[in-house]
């Protein structure tokens, strides 16, 4: 067996004496801290009877200690299950029921919920790193002055893991039906970290500015993994705050954000070329980056954002290049080792420029959905490609554009309408800040195209925009069946924590 434990791979690269994580308050954790704290936690959980392959479910606020718990699970071969901190009781109940964890770690405020639903040991971790577990033994994993068990327990022997062993289950947000637990293996983690490291030219002396949540693939795998995989360091913000980001850019070399983060940074006066002097790379993902944001950012800072594309089930699949042309509105070519194909409904590849469903295959692609073999089988082709559910097209240079989700596709009067196409046109209208296009039930057409728009009247060339005016303008640009039947003006689009527009909420709001 080739050793595939993700932590063991990382450990070959990192130097115990080097800094791992710097907090805005000046506190720094070294790789020795990461190693010892995660070792202590792994010991503790083992003593509580957690075994390789058991699930550890975690719903806590972002903190360095949260990361130590994560790496403890990887080291011991436990399956780590992070939950979005926004999930409410009925959602948590579902995850606990589905995952059947052997240990649960939650925020102190959620203790009663976990006690009620989890049939296992429950511990709490607050955002100052204070840990408390069932047996009422308290400890502080954060600082060396207090240790949960005894300090000799820091030297934990990592569990040998096969590439196929599951490291993490990440529940997909799922706008329809129950969320599905994507089983991500140690092999997936190693493959994706290695591919991204070389695609983005990661160096040991790179410093990542980390301001993403760590319950999601973006902040946990793409961001944290690349740091630890390369033994480099990160400036760790427990939440995204434009002022803090601007303050820490001069001490960082890489920043990763979701598009909304970039929009909010652009709204901050302190963002300029000087603040970015030390930066070598900005990346964006998890939701589409508007061409306007890409261009505004370049104008303000002199940096072009590298947009990449991936999903929970697959890790990262494509990226605009480090060297070479970064094309706004595209997510770049497939990454090394990732096969992609864009197909029609009969799973036949479509021509360049044509829209179709994107399929991917590679060592980055997950094993399947936890306890859902039928659902897993439905999403894979016989030759091992995973159906992403994203509608995409390929250009003549091999760059992929994501047009939307297949379930967002609108069928109006029997004709397919891709929301992204309409949104791109709307976004170009002077005064439109951003837009979301949805389908709503319609007696004649089956579905009608409806646009929800955020406007900035000050920027509108010809005064405040009206529904009539926008519809008239659209009629001169695109086929009639694609023109929105209705336009709604809003102050802001509903978005989830990762910056994705919540079209299910819009469909519900405007269905009548
Ligand atoms: P998640 O599993 O939460 O990471 O969501 C994955 C989905 O986010 C993908 O299937 C895409 O629909 C969307 N997504 C991620 N990155 C991008 C991107 N750069 N452009 C457009 N959509 C993206």
Image: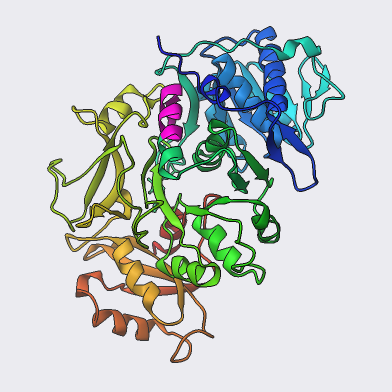
Vertical arrangement, residue 114 with respect to residue 43, above or below? below
Which of the 4 quarters of the picture holds residue 289? bottom left
Q: Nearer the viewer, residue 469 or 303?
A: 303
Vertical arrangement, residue 467 with respect to residue 82, above or below? below
Q: Is residue 328 magenta?
A: no
- Residue 137: give x, y in percent of width and height: 82, 16
- Read off the magenta span: 179-194
- Residue 255: give x, y in percent of width and height: 56, 51
Vertical arrangement, residue 442 with respect to residue 196, above or below? below
Q: Residue at x 65, y 72 (%)?
A: 269
**Left or right of residue 488: residue 341:** left
Q: Nearer the viewer, residue 443 or 461?
A: 461
- Residue 75: give x, y in percent of width and height: 58, 18
Q: Is residue 364 visible?
A: yes
Residue sticking out furthest to the right: 145
Q: Which quadrant is home to the C terminus?
A: bottom left
Q: Residue at x 30, y 37 (%)?
A: 338
């Amino acid at each position: 067996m080739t050793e595939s434990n993700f932590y063991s791979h990382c450990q070959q690269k990192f130097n115990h004496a080097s800094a791992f994580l710097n907090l805005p308050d000046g506190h720094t954790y070294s790789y020795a801290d990461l190693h010892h704290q995660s070792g202590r936690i792994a010991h503790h959980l083992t003593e509580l009877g957690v075994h390789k392959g058991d699930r550890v479910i975690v719903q806590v606020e972002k903190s360095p200690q949260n990361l130590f718990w994560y790496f403890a699970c990887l080291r011991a071969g436990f399956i780590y299950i992070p939950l979005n901190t926004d999930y409410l009781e009925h959602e948590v109940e579902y995850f606990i029921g589905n995952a059947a964890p052997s240990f649960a770690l939650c925020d102190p405020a959620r203790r009663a919920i976990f006690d009620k639903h989890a049939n296992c040991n429950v511990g709490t971790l607050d955002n100052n790193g204070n840990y408390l577990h069932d047996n009422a033994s308290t400890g502080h994993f954060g600082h060396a002055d207090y240790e949960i068990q005894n300090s000799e327990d820091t030297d934990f022997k990592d569990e040998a893991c096969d590439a196929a062993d599951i490291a993490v289950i990440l529940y997909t947000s799922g706008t329809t039906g129950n969320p599905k637990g994507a089983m991500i293996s140690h092999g997936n983690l190693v493959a994706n970290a290695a591919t991204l490291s070389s695609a983005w030219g990661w160096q040991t002396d790179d410093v990542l500015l980390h301001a993403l949540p760590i319950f999601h693939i973006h902040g946990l795998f793409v961001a944290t993994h690349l740091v630890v995989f390369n033994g480099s360091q990160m400036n760790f913000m427990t939440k995204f705050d434009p002022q803090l980001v601007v303050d820490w850019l001069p001490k960082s070399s890489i920043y990763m954000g979701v598009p909304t983060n970039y929009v909010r940074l652009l709204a901050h006066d302190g963002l300029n070329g000087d603040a970015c002097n030390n930066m070598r790379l900005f990346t964006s993902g998890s939701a589409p980056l508007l061409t306007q944001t890409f261009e505004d950012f370049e104008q303000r800072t002199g940096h072009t954002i590298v947009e990449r594309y991936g999903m929970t089930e697959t890790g990262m699949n494509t990226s605009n290049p480090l060297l070479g042309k970064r094309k706004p509105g595209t997510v770049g070519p497939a990454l090394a080792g990732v096969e992609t194909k864009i197909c029609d409904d009969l799973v036949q590849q479509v021509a360049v420029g044509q829209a179709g469903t994107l399929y991917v295959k590679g060592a980055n692609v997950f094993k399947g959905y936890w306890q859902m073999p039928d659902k897993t089988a439905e999403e894979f082709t016989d030759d091992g490609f995973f159906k992403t559910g994203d509608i995409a097209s390929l250009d003549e240079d091999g760059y992929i554009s994501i047009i939307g989700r297949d379930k967002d596709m609108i069928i109006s009067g029997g004709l397919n309408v891709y929301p992204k196409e309409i949104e791109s046109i709307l976004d170009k209208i002077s005064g439109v800040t951003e837009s979301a296009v949805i389908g709503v039930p319609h007696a004649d057409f089956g579905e009608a195209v409806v646009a929800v728009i955020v406007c900035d009247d000050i920027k509108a060339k010809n005064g405040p925009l009206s529904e009539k005016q926008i519809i008239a303008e659209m009629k001169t640009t695109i086929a009639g069946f694609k023109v929105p039947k209705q336009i709604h003006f809003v102050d802001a689009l509903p978005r989830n924590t990762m910056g994705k527009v919540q079209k299910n909420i819009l469909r519900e709001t405007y269905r009548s």
